[in-house]
Image: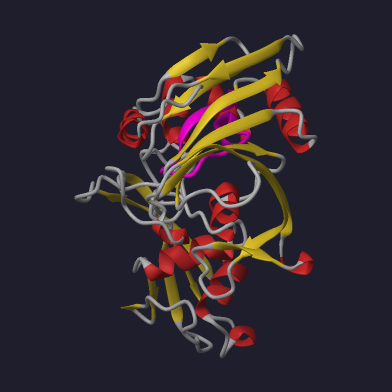
Amino acid sequence: MKQASEIISVGVDGEGEAHGEVEVRSFTVPAASHGQRLDRVLAEQVPELSRSYLQQLIEAGHVRLASRVVTKAAQRVRAGEAVSVELLPTAQAQAFRPEPVAFPVLYEDDDILVIDKPAGLVVHPAAGNWTGTLLNGLLARDARCALLPRAGIVHRLDKDTSGLMVVARSRVAMDRLVERIAAREVERQYLAIAHRPWIGPERRIVEGFIGRDPRNRLRMAAVGEGSGKPAWTAIDCLWSGERHCVVHCTLGTGRTHQIRVHMATLGHPLVGDRLYGGTADLGLDRQALHAYRLAFRHPISNLALEFRAALAPDLADAAQRLGYNPPL
């Protein structure tokens, strides 16, 4: 089977994505691959690249089959057909690059950063948010982050959740922080504003399992033991009014959307959290959730550290509308 490779020069498109020299890989479909999917054949002939990466190239129009552009990975091929693929960087491939992104830093030493993440800032690149994330900002701020998995990010906050995060700046610190988070030795506490007057005792412990909602893949849900991961949240009511309540949440585990799911399960969806039954209210159009306290032992010195972050301005305004001043 004959395979060839060449280098071509390309310009910069309107989004600034493709520039410099790009490799074009060409081959003919071998007899043994007759009738197979295009993405499978590409994966066999370009084994150093992942199948998912090659699927992105196909969907973006960078693959030709018998001289015509093909955009469906499931396209069947015939023996002897000519295939060429431009190995252009996809959005995902370019996601891990430095970009200037603003975020307040509350503490910094050689091994860790503690930041106050603004609402609206995505933590890690993913579909729909390949650029402008906290990870991109960390890479721009500190070249050493490029040497660490996920640029040193050891835990996450949702895009529209504000508040405290710790980020590693060394590999030893990262490994120890990951271990301590898994061992529940990192205290993470949140303040939230929810719909409806508080129901039940002032303190409620919510335990169960959280997994992907089978009816809506964008949501998480309380599920059975075999369908999710254990999740534990302690929720204390700080204030309750005619239409809202303010609660303090302590995480025992850190599952995706955990507090949002548990509050909705209790019948108190967060203000602004449309995904889980909340509505825009009190001037808020994002979930009313703020990570205000973070406490842990320093991963290198073992010194006890505690950090607190004042409410983001929109949450402070919402609390003022309720006539409540949270004791943070």
Of residues 48 and 82, which is closer to you in this image? Answer: 48
x and y percentages locating residue 327 in the rendered image: 50, 22
The N terminus sits in image quarter: bottom right
- Can you name the residue that lies furthest to the left here? 14
Percent of width and height locating residue 318: 33, 36
Decide which of 189, 18 is in the foreground and name it.
Answer: 189
Q: What residue is drawn where x is 27% and y is 50%?
A: 10
As for residue 161 lying within the magenta part, the answer is yes
Q: How many marks?
A: 0
Compared with 132, 31 (above or below) is: below
- What's the image's color scheme? secondary structure
- Residue at x 60% of width, y 53% of height: 262
Q: Quadrant of residue 45?
A: bottom right
Q: Residue at x 48, y 55 (%)?
A: 269
Comparing 241 with 207, the one in front is 241
Residue at image position (57%, 56%) is 261
Vertical order, 319 against 242 (above or below) = above
Residue 163 appears at what percent x and percent y?
48, 30
Instruction: Indicate the quadrant where residue 128 lies.
Output: bottom left
Does residue 193 show up magenta in the picture? no
Q: Position of residue 27 (x, y in %)?
A: 50, 72
Q: Nearer the viewer, residue 168 or 158?
A: 158
Height in image: 219 above or below 74?
above
Magenta highlight range = 150-167
Q: Is residue 117 left or right of residue 42?
A: left
